[in-house]
Amino acid sequence: MNASSTSPSPAPTGDRTPTPHPTRTSAPSAGTPEPLLGAVGMARPRIEGTAKVTGAVRYSSDEPMGDLAHGWAVTSTVTRGRIRDLDTSAALTMPGVLGVIDHRNAPRLDLEAGSFFGPDGGMHLLQTDEIPHSGRPVALVVAETAEQARSAARALRVTYDEEPCDVDFSLDHPAARPATSFIGADATVGDVDTELAASAVVVDARYVTPETHGAAMEPHSATAWWEDGRLQIVDSNQGPFLVAMTVAALFRLDPKQVRVRSPHVGGGFGSKSGGCGPQLVLAVMATAMFDRPVRVTLTRSQVFQTVSMRPTTDQRVRIGSDADGRLRAIDHTAAFEVSKLADYLENCTELTNTLYAARAIRTRRSAVPVDILPPYSVRGPGATPGSFALESAMDEVAERLHMDPLELRLRNEPSAGPVSGLPFSRRNLTACLREGARRFGWATRDHRPRTGREGHLLVGTGMAATSFGAGALPSTASITAETDGAFTVAIGASDIGTGARTALTAVAAEALRVPPERIRLLIADSDLGPAWGAGGSRGTTSWSWAITEAAAKLRSRPGGATLPLTVSFDTTESLGELPLMERHSYSAVFCEATVDPATGEVRVRRLLGMFAVGRVINPLLARSQLVGGMIMGLSMALHEEGVRDPATGRHLNTDFAGYHIAAHADVPDIEADFVPDYEPGDPSGIKGVGEIGTVGTAAAIANAVWHATGHRRRTLPIRPDHLVEERPLP
Amino acid sequence: MTDGTRSEILLRVNGLTHRLDVDNRRTLLDALREDTGRTGPKKGCDRGQCGACTVLLDDRRVVSCLTLAVAADGSDVTTVEGLAPDGELHPLQQAFVQLDGFQCGYCTPGQLCSAVAMLAEHAAGWPSAVTTDVSPERPAPELDAVEVRERLSGNLCRCGAYPSIVRAVLETAARAEVTG
């Protein structure tokens, strides 16, 4: 498709439920176009809200399907080695069993297929007898019912020739190598060593963040079948078009032969991005071999073992400052785990390039290959662990200077990109810091640690500043002016809980200058054309751009055209014309935490985030997303840790009893709000809200824990045994 | 008809009676989803750790993934689909929509069923782990945010809709008190 194509209108199969009454709570931002009543800027409940609270929406594993067979994955119990024998004889005689797929009979895949980072062996399932990591799928049992498949899976006898494994990651690992420069090179500005030597104070510290998992509530599920010469797929993913392209590449199919739908997705957080999940690879193999629709749904444990996660990071930060709090040098060295199966970049130093002015900035990123499955993006990739290191170190600088950590941030505002030299499109960190501090009551804080006390509890406050890159990626939207006055807006977007349906309906209504009730939005289908997925905080920006341009094109048509009339717009060219600038969302996060030194328990009592995220399409939904992001940051700070046994390499906590995510009782009421902001490089003025909520939160909490206790925790999660004190408080 | 591996059971689901021939290993969750077409209850973990499968079994909340279908024989089951039998949303469902008590929606059926039962438990005077006065003569504990959070902690939400869920529950409870 290109900018001038006119295509037949897509089938009108959108699911629209009655839209609840909107309420107007938005604060218009300076310099923004006047919003049309009922569209952009309105706090409007989700379009699919009624369907979600009545159980009517269908997620991937809910789709009714005739003649459905069920696949059950079998995973490796060793971390490294080879399959010696895989005895299927008992399983094959069991009731309902259709067959077993393993490396001896599986369809051959294209081993060049992968993600943006190149070939991805994580997707090349059942191709050899090699075991590259624990939990690697070694077979799929297919049967008439899920119980039969599961039962037969247990009867499979798999033996291995085990080899020694290495999961002992650290910054000093001998296999460490420079990370891919796929997303920009390492920074070298000024002379870090000279500036550090001239500094009044120097902080030099190591920070470790653990392996963390997206852990979306919906386990990954795919259903695949062949129909009229096309491979039909219903799958849980963050971008159906990108998944369809990956499936076509893996199975050497014509992309036109593959159709992927993901009507409703039960959360992603990165775990359903990055190409093609194991559930889908296995389901496509099975439908080809058994010539029936096959559904593969991963168990919760399999989700932990076979779906990409955020890698462990080990970071060293050195910051040198003058006595008045002006930074002389920032030196940030970040190492992260990668798999031997695929490359990846956990871009921990991204913020270090842009957040603060300093005479010298040096960043170095290294990847350490160990025997794990390929890591990939988890909410705020790179920035989330990177921010924990950088913003903890900034707090340590303030501590050494006996200075207000808020003031330290304000004092180091750059006027242009400190590494790139590029101008900022719109930098609103100062507004976030000042307004957040005002609402939080920061001005009365005693900056000395261990000064807050309430009975048996120590009380402290902490803050962090942060940013996340904003932008858009090529996408194509089509709009059809229908004969009944409605507009069918089609784009291969995905709503993983972000509110994309609701937001894009508002964007389309504004762009077409019609009430939202006249928009019929079609998403979540690869047949709707090339589109970026819900990832990188670039979903809504990418899709809105295409919709806005398609609407402008439709409105510029001379009147009197025959209806229905369809226009399409591909944003590839417009995006290429955008001048290079530093474009980021900003936030300031403030936290109040209590610590009980008798038990070591940390409770987050207050959490407040002020955000500059461009124009806000729907304040109700955007606020929800930011609050949710902050809760994920809280969870990372205090609870989450994927534990691998250094001896066996096995992932030990593959369920919600062992891998704790924040529950109701862990979460206080949380405030997230916006400062007026606008992104001039985006037709709708938006920046994206998906990830920035998570990014700064862990550091704000760790800094509050230091302020409460005087103990600096540089390794996450902060566990009770790290803080328990032998002597009772006086 | 009952042999060694299958049993015939009777389930009343949202008021409709189902006579089902089930594998004895079938969980109530799978029976609801696969045999009665009620896909509202979700399988988030299949081991009672996330609460997404919560339904009301004879008006009490249970995790249906840890309940065998044969053990529910003869029972009344209410799933999220049954909270709005006449098409009009339950006040809690309305509050979830208006206050955005969900994002992806996957945990929502469990949160709603759990919250409906929790409000009834509270109204019946049941204490929770954070109730300070548990003496037999105690007054009913006041339903505040801390009580709601404690009582709903068996229902995980990875999108982090917790604050909105708690607000929706408290608002619904307050409204019921005014009108009830």
Image (spheres, helix red, strand yellow):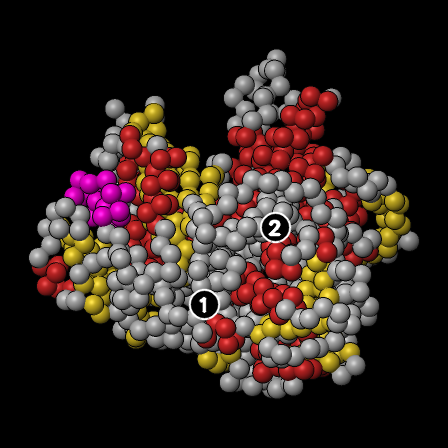
Q: Where is residue A319 shown, x and y percent of the image?
A: 20, 56
Q: What element carries label 1?
A: loop
Label 1 belongs to which residue? Answer: A375
Q: What amino acid is found at the position of numbered circle 1 in the picture?
A: Pro
Q: What amino acid is found at the position of numbered circle 2 in the picture?
A: Leu
Label 2 belongs to which residue? Answer: A36
A493 up-or-down from A653: above or below: below
Please state which of residues A412 and A89 is positioned toward the viewer in this rendering: A412
Q: Where is residue A595 shown, x and y percent of the image?
A: 35, 35
Please state which of residues A155 and A73 is positioned toward the viewer in this rendering: A73
Instruction: Give the numbered dot on residue A440.
Output: none
Q: Where is residue A423 shown, x and y percent of the image?
A: 32, 63
Q: Residues within 10 Å of mark 2 (few under 14, many from 20)?
A: some
Q: Is residue B133 left or right of residue B34?
A: left
Magenta region, main secondary structure: helix
Q: How crowded is mark 1: few (under 14 residues within 10 Å), some or many (20 or more)?
A: many
Q: In this view, does B110 lie to the left or right of A705?
A: right
Q: Which residue is drawn at 45% across and 54% down?
A: A678
Could you say which quadrant of the image residue A343 lies in? bottom left
A608 up-or-down from A622: above or below: above
Tell me which chain the residue with mark 2 is part of: A
Please say whether residue A570 is visible from this viewpoint.
yes
Q: Is residue A243 left or right of residue B71?
A: left
Tell me which chain the residue with mark 1 is part of: A
Task: Assess whether residue A410 is covered by the magenta stretch.
Answer: yes
Q: Of marks 2 and 1, which one's residue comes earlier in the chain?
A: 2
Task: Assess whether residue A413 is covered by the magenta stretch.
Answer: no
Q: Give the range drawn in magenta.
A: A394-411
Q: Which residue is drawn at 71% across and 47% down?
A: A19
Please say whether residue B26 is visible from this viewpoint.
no
Q: Look at the numbered discs 2 and 1 and tell me whether their residues touch, using CB distance below 8 Å.
A: no
Q: Where is residue A380 shown, x and y percent of the image?
A: 43, 58
